[in-house]
Amino acid sequence: MKAIVYTEYGSPDVLHMGEVAKPIPKENEVLVKVHATTVSYGSLAARTFGKMPPHEFNMPFLFWFGARIAFGWNKPKNPILGIEFSGVVEAVGQAVTTYKPGEAVFGYRGQGMACFAEYVTMPADGLLAHKPDTVSHAEAATIPYGALTALTLLRRLNLQPGQKVLIHGASGAIGSFMVQIAKQMGAEVTGTCGTRRMDFVKALGADRVIDYSREDFTQHSTKYDLIIDVLGRSSFNQCKRVLTPKGIYFPVSFKFTEVRQMLWTSRFGGQKVFLGLSDEKPADMQTLKSMIEAGTLKGYVDRTFPLEQVVEAHRYYESGQRSGNVILTVA
Ligand SMILES: NC(=O)c1ccc[n+]([C@@H]2O[C@H](COP(=O)([O-])OP(=O)(O)OC[C@H]3O[C@@H](n4cnc5c(N)ncnc54)[C@H](OP(=O)(O)O)[C@@H]3O)[C@@H](O)[C@H]2O)c1
């Protein structure tokens, strides 16, 4: 089958079309003909990881070390990128009863990657669900990574209706779903983003949008019950003055400083630093499917490229022009 392969870390030019063996589904797996996949933070990190020094990685050194071993120290271990997909079941293993050939599905392979290809396999009881008929393959492919991360992290924060939430980085893959899910939970949501994406974040349902390149939300008078910083570009010390007395600061990306602050603030009753890692479960894919069907969760497609134009797609992703997701169409 055709797949985009890479054998060394580097710029988008390391990606090229290759011929690889078509995967064979095991007893409990489905074989999916991929229709759409996304260019995402995960694929970008995996493509460049060998050249990324620890201080440029948005997580503590130990995470960088673990990821470097997982991705491959000197060259990539897994030659095919792509963390999420939407497609059609081509074949199923003997033990699979929940999916049938011809059914449309969408799913998340995460660090297992391999979605920049004509076919992928998935465990039938893994992060996989039937694609709602109301959305295209392109839209469905945008949902798993960002929405699973947003859903599982927000769930742990016990958000209450009426609470004021600020999402710093509301226009990206995780932030755009956090806005939608936090609104659904009844929160009053402020999102920050770059100038180009102000209308996009408003369209996601945010009550208020701040252009982070022009205004510093930590200097405003509004106080928040929860501040979520997707890239960890702010700090707890800066945010204290705009947090309510029992407010929570949650950097989705963090360093060792925030680990120390979380341990310290957990001993007292006031403002706290919360840290969490997404822990998506197969049932969460069914939750996302129900939310899509109910019209409360939407994936946004900015631009679509055919798989062959993966280099242009990665360049466009890196250019910072997108509002929503960059899609690769496969079939
Ligand atoms: N804790 C966990 O379990 C977990 C799980 C997955 C990922 N992550 C972390 O999440 C991050 C990737 O998130 P993502 O996929 O949503 O990334 P993304 O799609 O690239 O979105 C990044 C967001 O940050 C905004 N941004 C860019 N520069 C900024 C700045 N200087 N100040 C404030 N905001 C800025 C962007 O706004 P504009 O584009 O509008 O400028 C955009 O909204 C990575 O650091 C990864 O390590 C954490």
Image (spheres, rainbow, N blue to C red):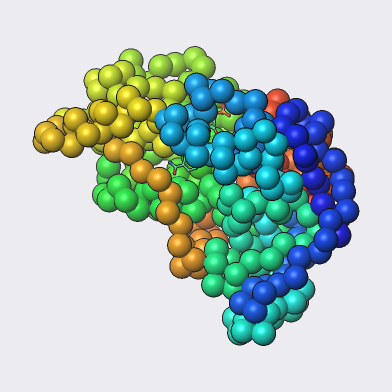
Is residue 65 visible in the rendered image? The answer is yes
Is the residue 313 above or below the residue 117 in the image?
above
Number of marks in the image? 0
| Placement of the C terminus among the 4 image quadrants | bottom right
Camera-side residue: 252 or 20? Answer: 20
Q: x%, y% of residue 27?
A: 65, 79
* Position of residue 314 in the picture relative to residue 278 (left or right): right
Q: x%, y% of residue 293?
A: 55, 66
* Position of residue 323 in the picture relative to residue 258 (left or right): right
Q: Who's the residue at 35% across and 53% down the image? A: 155
Is the residue 21 above or below the residue 18 in the image?
below
Q: Who's the residue at 58% across and 52% down the image? A: 110
Camera-side residue: 5 or 118? Answer: 5
| Placement of the N terminus among the 4 image quadrants | bottom right
Is residue 317 visible in the rendered image? The answer is no
Q: x%, y% of residue 184?
A: 40, 53
Q: Who's the residue at 25% across and 33% down the image? A: 262
* Position of residue 102 in the picture relative to residue 163 (left or right): right
Question: Quarter-wise, where is residue 317 in the image?
Answer: top right
Is the residue 113 above or below the residue 51 in the image?
below
* Position of residue 51 in the picture relative to residue 293 (left or right): right
Q: x%, y% of residue 192?
A: 47, 28
Q: Who's the residue at 45% across and 62% down the image? A: 281
